[in-house]
Image: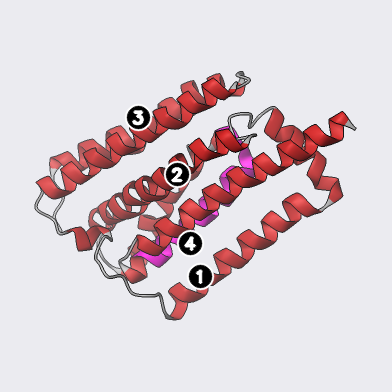
Amino acid sequence: MELHWSDHLFFVIVGVLIPLRTIFSTQPQLADLRFTTRMKLQLYWGNNLWLWLLAGATAGVWFGNGRPWALIGLDWPWSVPTGWPLVVTLAFMLLYVADTFLEVSRQVKRDPTAENIQTELSFLPQTAYEFFHFIFLALTAGFCEEFIFRGFFVRYFQCLFGYEEATYTLAILVPALIFGLVHLYQGWHAVVKITAMAIMFGYVFVHTNSLWLLIAIHAAVDLIGGAIAWGLSARSKVSADE
């Protein structure tokens, strides 16, 4: 794979300029908003459209430069990870389950989490109707974000830094850091967890050359997060009524 000027331009726009705008402009605006159902639906479907536009631009640059889809991780059928990639995948799933359990089961954490959803994360679904629309965003994010941040950006940095084993770490770390920072609106604790997830996903992608399992796990993580927000919100409302 050889880099073209369009690859560099795409990274500057999607990997630098858009994240900077998100961090310094969009995210502060979100922090000051208290979302109504209508506002949430506009946000969900607006982000749906935006992510598919970015994924379409990614596909255009990739296909326009004559590259096979298998190289970006979309080969089918995909194979189940083995060896260390399998270990890393299972480790992530276990850590995620453990962290989720601690987040919602301890009485010490449960109330602050619900309060956080009502204030800082008020864009998350709090009713069945909102969650239904959130499902489509979770599925879109699972595919589009993995396609862009793991598929394109990891391959871009592998090519930029060289395909030696020693450079793979940088090719995994840089997209992971960018991906983590664009989620700053969820707080620094979430940034650390999301960056760690992105690093583990990058490792699995580099060693399996497939995105499909990562897409499925990413979508599942988002769906679980939305379901937890809905459940905690419902619980806090019941407690308030009592």
Q: Residue at x 48, y 59 (%)?
A: 217
Question: Image quadrant of residue 74?
Answer: bottom left
Q: Tell me the number on the disc at residue 40.
A: none
Q: Position of residue 167 (x, y in %)?
A: 34, 62
| In magenta segment, residue 191 | yes
Position of 184 with respect to 228 (left or right) is left
Residue where numbered disc 1 is placed: 88
Q: Are marks 1 and 4 in contact (CB under 8 Å)?
A: yes
- The residue beneath circle 4 is 200
Q: Which residue is mark 2?
A: 179
- Residue 38 magenta-highlighted: no
Q: Is residue 20 visible?
A: no
Q: How is the image coloured?
A: secondary structure
Residue occupied by mark 3:
17
Badge 4 element:
helix
What secondary structure is the stretch in magenta mostly built from?
helix
16 lies left or right of 160:
right
Amino acid type of the residue tagged 4 in the rendering? Met
* Vertical comparison of 212 with 139: above or below: below
In primary-sequence order, the first of circles 1 and 2 is 1
Picture quadrant of residue 20: top left
> What range of the chain is rendered magenta?
185-205
Task: Judge the density around disc 4: few (<14), some (14-19), many (≥20) Cα neighbours within 10 Å.
Answer: many
